[in-house]
Image (cartoon, rainbow, N blue to C red):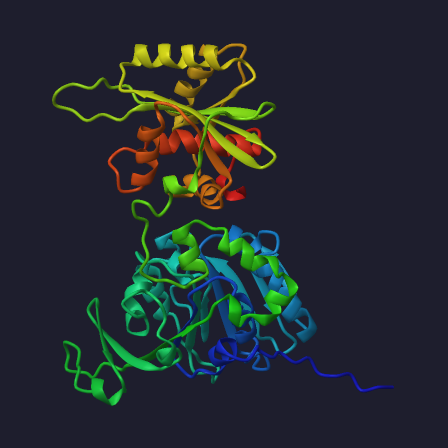
Amino acid sequence: MDEQKPNVIRPQEGPQEQFLATSADIAIYGGAAGGGKSWAILAECTRHIQNGSFGAQVFRRTTGQIFNEGALWDESGDIYRPLGGKPRKDIGRGTWTFPSGAKITFGHLQYDKTVFNYQGSQIPLIVFDELTHFSKKQFWYMVSRNRSMCGVKPYIRATTNPDADSWVCEFIDWWIDDKGFPIPERSGVVRWFIRVGDRIVWADSSDELSEHKDANGVSIPPKSATFIAAKLTDNKKLLEADPAYMANLMSLPTVERERLLGGNWKIRPAAGLYFQRSWCPVVDAAPAGMRIARGWDFAATEKNETNDPDWTSGTKIGELDGHYYILDNRKGRLSPSKVKTMYLNTAAEDGKSVNVYIPEDPGAAGKVVAQEQIKWLVGFTVRANRASGDKITRFTPFSAQAEAGNVSVVRGGWNESWFSALEGFPEASHDDDVDSTSEAFNGLITGSRYNLNNL
């Protein structure tokens, strides 16, 4: 009988191997999409599973991010089952138990107060998947739970994608250049720090921090940290298995493409990054046979000499064979009664073949208003959608298609105003045309009620 070959967990050469080899107390890995981050942290958790007293805790911000189809829990099975791991799922958490008794637990920190569920815990290895999703308060509280009585020196591992507005960006600033990109020669370099109140003091060695003492005159023990940059081109296995993934990232709008493909930590949404009129040729007419939708964003204040109210905006979009045509945009700063008149007249002009999409504000009052607006258009197809995600998230699907050259604009007197409004997003003071465009486009591509989590 052939001797059974042992299971071997082996990282890819490059950043993944470097991440699994670092001795830093805190190691943050990634900075772009597709760098093999999830596999790396799941593999790291197996390092001490022969120690029956060892335990690792893996966090995502929400339960869904752990247990959704193909998410972290599903991926962990490919690694842990061959090593003898036995899974168990409970409400909000999942645990793998190994023959030695060692455990790897998956859980969430959905709210800041969730950290208090871990009061008194001693966790040798704490893992944060997508660190920028967690608050600074959550991270530093859990650092206090990073303790060990099993003989394994406590340590923390984390993965991340870039976010210029996250506390993580400030924490890893030394490893990032002025343009927001990782500095290759610093990737993996270990530095030391202490926290004095909420301030972090950095040094190149632990000895440089020995003079710092707390209020009682006791030396503050330093911790080591490193950032290891990785991006899609470092993950040869993913590129071989899914060569289209690169194209998926390249099709993203500028800001998200720079973050997720380029690993840029300092790029932020700015005017012209989500829309440029040069992306959309102006045509004299649209083809026949299109599916057509009009989206609305409502306001209800008239303009006077002293105010600068929002606009009621309605944008009409058609689609044929994967190409989109902006057919019309109309707007006004109107009283509630005039908004209703504009809404009814526009629907009558468009005809009943045009689906109408309106926003539904959160809360009971928003639902009542939306139901009333649907009743106004008896005989028309009207759907109210409760917004999911912020305005940028809702606009991103349209932005991506425009940048890819899949959007044309039918010539009209409204063109300049609509172009200017979209080019100014998100810095402009008014985004009504952006919102009505998002309503029409997202409704059109799904054909019914839409959820931005599925776009």
Q: Is any part of residue 173 visible from this angle?
A: yes
Q: Return the residue nearer the eye: 20 or 283.
A: 283
Residue 356, above or below 252: above
Quadrant into which the N terminus falls: bottom right
User: Residue at the location (55% across, 52% down)?
Assistant: 91
Farthest residue to the left: give it: 306
Task: Give the x, y percent position of residue 107.
Answer: 50, 59
- Within the image, what quadrant is residue 312 found in? top left
On the picture, is 267 further left or further right than 262?
left
User: Residue at the location (19% across, 83% down)?
Assistant: 218
User: Residue at the location (16% across, 18% down)?
Assistant: 304
Task: Give the x, y percent position of residue 284.
Answer: 46, 26
- Within the image, what quadrant is residue 198 found in? bottom left
Residue 330, above or below 155: above
Tell me how many marks there are. Answer: 0
On the picture, is 28 further left or further right than 170?
right
Task: Give the x, y percent position of residue 202.
Answer: 24, 78
Q: Return the residue nearer the eye: 303 or 74.
A: 303
Residue 262, above or below 281: below
User: Residue at the location (26% across, 19% down)?
Assistant: 333
Q: Return the residue nearer the eye: 56 or 283.
A: 283
On the picture, is 130 further left or further right than 141?
right
Farthest residue to the bottom: give it: 207
Farthest residue to the front: give it: 284
Farthest residue to the right: give it: 1
Task: Give the x, y percent position of residue 275.
Answer: 38, 42
Q: Is any part of residue 362 visible from this angle?
A: no
- Within the image, what quadrant is residue 257 found in? bottom left
